[in-house]
């Protein structure tokens, strides 16, 4: 019909008339253009050098001009072989900023043509980090690429930069490069912790974070399933950090050395003690290890470990008592009880260790040495030895305590015995 052309179609028809003109020479139908798309047509025109014409079409149709302007920049660089980098840069930068387009393709073209300085100058004006960072890596501007990636706060982009740079730099060098970039450092450490945890302490040292380095080395050693490897890792930790001026790190190094000595003692004990197999003592504490040395009649070995790791006198005495009682070494236990007038841990642990190993006679022998009658009575009652408890109470003529003991006893013979003592003490 003779109706009007829809307003949306009218500008397109004008464009197609221009395209078919002899100067342009692109006879194209509406359906062909819709399949090709107008931006693709604009790029083809720009690549034929028809920059101004392509720009006019884009403005006429209300489309973005960035593709055309980017293509103009590329052509300007290709054609400007005899111009200096500065001159070319000046002619490009104002136009590119005016149209708010990406500098990345122009920079990439300069780089391909061997104009590194121009490529870097253009790239420094790129505002989109996602465009800028990959190209900076290509240009070998690694540190700047990392800085820009971190400035963008885009962790995916920082990851991408780190993964590319790991191909080019040893991890330790890359860590130093990241030093003042917290986001890059944390992502690099997370990557290394996952991929190569053993190298993490060394990396933390390179980042001047010795406390974390010592902590990571200790954690890695504790997680090692093979005791020989764990011992080696602990020894390395001690070697690396024992000279530290930081008290916390020094303490950690000392703890690592002690643990390595414990593992060594466990190896020796497993090899020499009958009834033990390799791996039986894995994970045992220092105190448990010393106790097992005394239980398996390896007294010198236990004493040496306790001395090497500076075990406290009280703890050493307590584990020795338990170990000797478990090993039924009553003569040695008796000898230990006579080393001092009163053992550093008192007599109660001797009584309990003997009783736990079914030697009530030995337990009573040590109970009789307790000077505090209340404690002596309590232990005798705990062992259900009511007569001995009553005798202890009667020796200090404590009728009230005898009444308490009588209330706990139930055997008729025990009750009669206690009643006699109460009668004696009441006179």
Image (tube, rainbow, N blue to C red):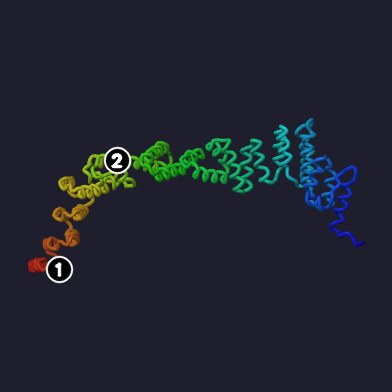
Give me the residue at 25% from left, 44% from top. Answer: 293
Q: Is residue 252 left or right of residue 74?
A: left
Question: Quick one: SS at disc 2?
Answer: helix
Q: How many marks?
A: 2
Q: Residue furthest top?
A: 82
Comes first in the chain, label 2 or label 1: 2
Q: Residue at x 69, y 37 (%)?
A: 120
Percent position (x, y) of residue 336?
A: 18, 46
Image quadrant of residue 85?
Answer: top right
Which residue is found at the position 58% from the left and 35% from the top? 168
Q: Which residue is mark 1?
A: 410
Mark 2 crowdedness (10 Å alpha carbons): few <14, some 14-19, many ≥20? many
Q: Residue at x 65, y 41 (%)?
A: 134
Q: Position of residue 119 (x, y in %)?
A: 71, 36
Pointer 2 with pointer 1, Cβ within 8 A: no
Q: Measure how far apart labels 2 and 1 are at the Cα level.
A: 49 Å
Residue lying farthest to the right in this orientation: 2
Measuring from the top left, give residue 287's x and y in whole percent.
29, 47
Asked if residue 367 is positioned above or below residue 72 in the image, the reply reads below
Q: Is 375 situated above or below 240?
A: below
Quarter containing the C terminus: bottom left
| In-image side of 192 versus 388 (left or right) | right
Looking at the image, can residue 340 be seen? no
Is residue 235 among what the camera can see?
A: yes
**Residue located beneath label 2 in the image:** 265
């Amino acid at each position: 019909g003779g109706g009007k052309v829809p307003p949306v179609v009218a500008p397109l028809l004008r464009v197609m008339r221009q395209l078919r003109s002899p100067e342009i020479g692109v006879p194209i139908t509406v359906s062909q253009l819709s399949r090709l798309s107008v931006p693709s047509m604009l790029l083809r025109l720009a690549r034929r050098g028809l920059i101004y014409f392509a720009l006019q079409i884009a403005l006429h149709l209300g489309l973005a001009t960035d593709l055309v302007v980017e293509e103009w920049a590329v052509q300007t660089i290709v054609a400007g072989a005899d111009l200096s980098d500065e001159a070319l840069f000046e002619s490009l930068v104002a136009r590119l900023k005016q149209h708010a387009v990406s500098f990345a393709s122009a920079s990439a073209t300069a780089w391909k043509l061997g104009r590194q300085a121009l490529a870097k100058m253009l790239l420094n004006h790129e505002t989109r980090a996602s465009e800028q960072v990959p190209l900076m890596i290509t240009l070998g501007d690694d540190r700047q690429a990392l800085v820009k990636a971190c400035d963008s706060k885009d962790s995916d982009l920082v990851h991408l930069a780190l993964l590319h740079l790991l191909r080019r730099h040893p991890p330790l060098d890359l860590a130093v490069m990241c030093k003042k970039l917290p986001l890059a450092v944390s992502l690099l450490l997370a990557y290394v912790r996952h991929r190569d945890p053993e190298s993490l302490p060394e990396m933390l040292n390179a980042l001047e974070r010795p406390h974390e380095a010592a902590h990571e080395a200790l954690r890695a050693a504790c997680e090692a399933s093979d005791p020989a490897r764990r011992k080696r890792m602990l020894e390395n930790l001690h070697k690396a950090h024992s000279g530290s001026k930081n008290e916390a790190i020094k303490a950690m190094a000392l703890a690592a050395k002690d643990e390595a000595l414990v593992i060594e003692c466990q190896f020796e004990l497993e090899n020499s003690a009958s009834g033990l197999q390799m791996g039986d003592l894995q994970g045992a504490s220092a105190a448990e290890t010393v106790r097992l040395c005394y239980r398996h009649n390896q007294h010198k070995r236990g004493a040496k470990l306790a001395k090497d790791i500076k075990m406290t006198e009280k703890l050493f005495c307590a584990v020795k008592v338990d170990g000797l009682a478990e090993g039924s070494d009553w003569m040695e236990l008796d000898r230990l009880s006579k080393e001092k007038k009163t053992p550093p841990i008192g007599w109660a642990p001797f009584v309990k260790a003997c009783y736990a190993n079914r030697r009530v006679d030995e337990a009573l022998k040590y109970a009789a040495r307790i000077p505090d009658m209340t404690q002596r009575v309590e232990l005798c009652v705990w062992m259900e030895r009511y007569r001995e408890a009553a005798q202890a109470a009667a020796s200090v003529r404590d009728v009230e305590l005898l009444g308490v003991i009588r209330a706990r006893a139930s055997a008729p013979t025990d009750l009669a015995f206690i009643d006699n003592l109460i009668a004696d003490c009441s006179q």
